[in-house]
Image: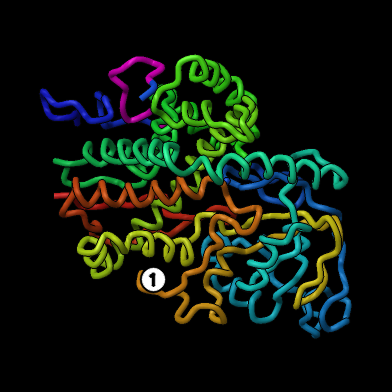
Amino acid sequence: MRAAPGAQDPAGFTGPVTQGPGTCPFVPSGGADATGPGILTGPGIPTGPGIPIALRPAPARRAPDADGDGNGCGCGDGTIPPSLRSPAVGRDPYPLYRTLRTSYPLVHDEAFGAWLISRYEDVRAALADPRLVAPPPESTLTHLTHLEDRAHAAHRALLSPALRGRALAALRAGVERAAFVLARRLSGRQEADLVAEFCHWLPAVAAVTALGLPHEETARVREWCRDGLTHLGSGHGDLDAFLRPYVARRRARPGRDLLSVLCTARADGRPLPDETVVGTAGTLLGAGGEATHLALASFLANLLDHPAQLRLVREHPALIPAAWAESLRRDPAVHIVLRRALAPVVTGAGTIPAGAAVACLLGSAGRDPARFAAPDRYDILRPAPGQLAFGAGRHRCLGVQLARLTAECALHALLEALPRLRRAPGGRPADEGLITRGPKTLPVLLG
């Protein structure tokens, strides 16, 4: 389906809605340069797209445990705890999460190759602990602190002030434009799959639009994101080479897009170095990867599964941020965030040895009954849904701003363009995945 005859989308896009795998769902009508979360590797560890960090597991080591029986789990009975590697966990991880929280709050999963932390308070503390880091690939422990501090300091110095004012306005404008275009292209249809035709594309399209990059490059950028951009926006040499020429052009002739704002920003009276601008742009593009599109799909699925709450959001759009936060708590796209211990870390459940791989189970923490009442229930009026889904402390994902804007603008656009949007008959398709998880399809009725 095409836009109405004689009409042009506000973003300047024309072209077909339908697409095959890897094909961007629209083609820009303007010029090619308009200015207008890592793969986990190592033995015993699963691999796949969208894993937020890259590390190699340390050799299996057991630390002193809470009950001193030497089994490392504090369970006191010598039993072997269940593993994330169990085939049933990928289909439904929540029974295992309940078992871990109750009986094995800190346990070494030998098959998975990491220490598992499953309770909300322990996960929150681990994500903010400077001794637990997300190391770049091939790094040794002696290099981690320097690299982490340098990279985070550069990005914090830029993004804290820059994602306000002109930069935030440019980011929001790009996201709103992309969401409107994709939602409008579904209008007039009787049915659609929101994952394949909306969620699959919107995060990457929004980042590309906000940065003022050529929209015909969206499919390629999206594949880079799927191949493993890290939480610091690095991890793909082709992306760096792709962005450098655009940075040079924006420095010479800045426009109103976000990349131009970054190129003209100043820190301590000096322009930001190209490395920082490219890294920041890569971070935002990385936020257009699998984790954000799965989070968006779960967000829409949760609202469609609860028509009364969707109706409440329609009537009170100010509730959209709360609805998004609650979806991230109940159904985070990233269920497992991995860290490496620079030094021994003592927790309330035991001690993690230096050099060990640590798996922070966000999917378990978000449904911890010690923290949340009726944790399996989706409730947009929940007073405090927590803030773990995109990290915490200095490791808080730098793309969180884009992910939140994408979700809010997506829902606004869909409700405006598709006032009769509702779930198609049949049950909700099962979520899939272990490290990243979410619905792979979301059939809806539009007319």
Relative image position of residue 16 (x, y in whole percent): 25, 27
Q: Quadrant of residue 62?
A: bottom right
Provide the secondary structure element on which disc 1 rests: loop
Residue at horizontal 21 percent and vertical 47 percent from the top: 191
Where does the magenta region start and end? 21-34
Answer whether residue 323 is visible to the viewer in this image. Answer: yes
Residue at horizontal 88 percent and vertical 81 percent from the top: 68
Please state if 213 lies on the left or on the right of 112 as rendered.
left
| Amino acid type assigned to the residue bearing label 1 in the image | Tyr
Q: Is residue 240 above or below residue 280?
A: above
Residue at horizontal 45 percent and vertical 37 percent from the top: 167
Give the crowd class for mark 1: few <14, some 14-19, many >=20 residues within 10 Å: some
Answer whether residue 433 is visible to the viewer in this image. Answer: no
Provide the major secondary structure of the magenta segment.
loop
Relative image position of residue 37 (x, y in whole percent): 57, 46
Please state if 107 lies on the left or on the right of 373 as rendered.
right
Q: Is residue 2 magenta?
A: no
The quadrant the N terminus occupies is top left
Q: Is residue 228 above or below residue 66?
A: above
Q: Which residue is mark 1?
A: 378
Relative image position of residue 98 (x, y in whole percent): 59, 76
Residue at horizontal 37 percent and vertical 19 percent from the top: 34
Q: Nearer the viewer, residue 427 or 397?
A: 397
Q: Quadrant of residue 176?
A: top left
